[in-house]
Image (spheres, rainbow, N blue to C red):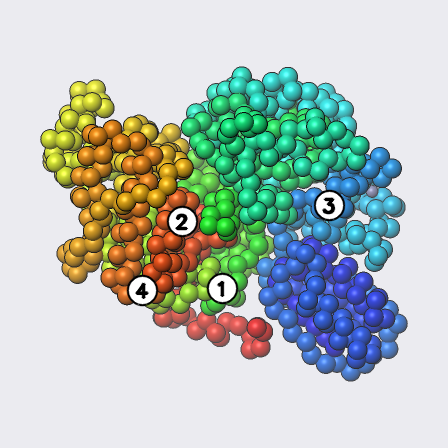
Amino acid sequence: VAVTVQGTVQGIGFRPFLYREAARGGLTGWVRNRTDGVELEVQGTPGAVEAFLDALHTRPPPAARITTFAVSHREPVAESHFVIAGSDAAGPARPSLPADLAPCPACRRELGDPADRRHGYPFTNCTYCGPRYSIVEGLPYDRPRTVMRAFPLCPACLAEYESPGDRRFHAQPVACPACGPALRYLDPHGRPLAAAAAALTRAVATVRDGGIVALKGVGGYQLLCDATSAEAVVRLRDRKQREAKPFAVMFPHPEPLAADAERGARAALDGYVSLGEAERALLTSPAAPIVLARKRTGPGARALAAHVAENNPYLGVMLPASPLHLLFMEALGGPAVCTSGNLAGEPLCTDDAEALARLAGIADGYLVHDRPIVRPVDDSVTRAVTGGPLLLRRARGYAPRPLELAEPVDGILAVGAQLKNTVALGIGHEAVMSQHLGDLDSVAAAELLAATVDDLLGFFNVAPRAVACDLHPDYVSTRYAEQLAKRLAVPLLRVQHHHAHAAAVMAEHGLAAALALAWDGTGHGDDGLPWGGEVLRCEGMQATRVAHLRPFPLPGGDAAARDPRRSALGLLFAHDPSLAARYAAAWYPRADAEALLALLASGKYAPRTTSVGRLFDAVAALLGLAAENRFEGEAAMALEFAAVDAGAVPAYALPLDGGANGCGRLDWGPLLGELLGDLAAHVSPARISARFHAALGAGALAAAQASGAGAVALAGGCFQNARLVEELTARFAQNGITVYRAVEVPPNDGGIALGQLLVAARRLAAGEGGTLRPIDELRAPGERHA
Ligand SMILES: [Zn+2]
Ligand SMILES: [Zn+2]
Ligand SMILES: [Zn+2]
């Protein structure tokens, strides 16, 4: 029989697996990688062929994700073996490349085994683990198209690479101390101080002595310091110009590398955070992301330096994501702050010379190696909400794993929003999403956006037939998309921000239509105003606004994103101007207070917003929880955290009334009245915050019920808030309404590109954008199988 398989089937030991299965059944034939997947032919007894196909179906290698599987019969040919044939580089590229994967248990064992030839070797890997996306330059995924081509295999590695029974059979990044990459430790001027094991020892000593080490990780440089040393953590904050945003912390792997290691001497993760099953599963998954977990308190709890994540009941924790990290953390024996190697607001450094220049003055030493990084891939960030994962930042371990959609999005490129930018490329029914690129405020970030688009288009050999962007005219991504569409002479489709948020969740769950709550900071509305508390009925290519938060003025517009008190003043002003005057006088120097009140009174430079994110800011400011947003979402997070241990409380009133044009309006007036009453009565912030969250739950339910919806999609940055998600999910469940939320794509602006892709595809299919062939014609008949 002849078989073609598509999905994530390259770089995860798929061909070796097939070889072993064929050998088991005495089958002959061949297998080869193609740009769009894997193709093979086998012959043998009917029973053996059937067993082979069954194995392929029911127990493929762990990281494989088969999306397409087609079998056809062939006449028998004369052959005596099963062979792995050369790859076929012709033909259309299809996404079939996995993400970078953390060390598998077998590689971990070898690292700690003094008798193994890879004992202590920081670049060990096999078909089940190791670098992928960060080292590959083109498809199909074979060694000559990775940075590993610079490292010819030694005889021992070559034997493993060619031996079908070996775990490293056709493992493209295979390496050992004799033939593979090597470590070096450099001083801040780039002068080598030590090599190999000695380099690791020097770097660990630097961290132990309170220094900061720049470590060349999987997808870029990271900065590490002792997470238990207040002095080291404060120094890192100062040098990195990162005032308050929480740092992630890496812990040694829970299983020591050396069998005889003393467990007692190790700083166990469980001493610092309490982990549920979902958190544990995320931490130990091959993606090895950062996981937000509750800090432990009470007797027996161990604490890190306060400045790691201040005023925060959560800690971002991670386990070593590469053999180098495993060895480093094993030697350190305690927790280390592990943060992106960049200045705040800039992209990750990947190049050695660039790191030495850009991290000058930050790092006390550099732990580097000679395996190049093809593209920056930051650490992913996740949390578990109502038992399931919620991705907050999608990068290493996830990108560029394609998402299988229920409808075609072929040939469309979507460039995302301004903050937490990602881009998405449609190939057939699949969306390939780039890794998190970050905020586009810096020149370097804007360049990274362009480079990533070139990278994706080149990688999959796609000439886009349309470009999608946000409706906001001033986003860097919008301006880039305008130029790109012009250069390529293809249609540009502008997608409203909250429609895109909603469509991202619809794409992830295969929904044709949905009632969506799109709640976030702000996005450019159809009327040019800053939206952010929308209830949208999404059907086909349309989104109809059926309800929104009652608008309130934002003095200074965008400036309110950094100063939550401005949101509070706007809310108070709309409620009772004399209250706004009182708070302004208390919060600001007299001149500033007068200027802000003048903006509110004139209505100039005080656009009316419907943003739930700004409502969170306002309430946080009223409670005195945050006077500024030193990083995006700080005030909203403070408000979520205030209620973290609060039980059930009565909701403030957030009634739904009929606004203008038949559009419902969630009126925050009664909520604000009750909240000010609680404040005057010195009710605790925990209870006020809990009542506020409950009000949003009740308001959301009322809006959904008024629309007669049986299912609701939760979209937008507000749904990074676990309490809000849980509040809404519980209320909807009690009322028989199904909830869809973001799982593998961030609900924040990191998911915008996916939503843009879906909306653009639907609009193109409906005929927008000139004379285009129907999408179905772009696919060869029979190309796709369920
Ligand atoms: Zn492995
Ligand atoms: Zn070797
Ligand atoms: Zn948004």
User: Which residue is painted at 57% across and 47% down in the image?
Assistant: 277
Q: Nearer the viewer, residue 527 or 588?
A: 588
Between marks 3 and 2, how big is the CA–CA gap?
35 Å
Q: Which residue is mark 3?
A: 105
In the rendering, which numbered label is found on residue 709? 4
Residue 286 in picture, x, y percent from top left: 64, 48
Mark found first going from the N terminus, 4 or 2: 4
User: Mark 3 vs ligand 1: CB under 8 Å?
Assistant: yes
Can residue 735 be seen in this snapshot? yes
CA neighbours of label 4 inside 10 A, class few (<14), some (14 to 19), many (20+): some
Q: Amino acid at mark 1?
A: Leu
Q: Nearer the viewer, mark 4 or mark 2?
A: 2
Determine if residue 453 is in view.
Answer: no
Of tags 3 and 2, which is closer to the observer? 2
- Give the amino acid at mark 2: Glu
Task: Please determine whether, in this image, residue 758 is positioned above or below residue 304.
Answer: below
- In terms of secondary structure, where does tag 3 sit? helix
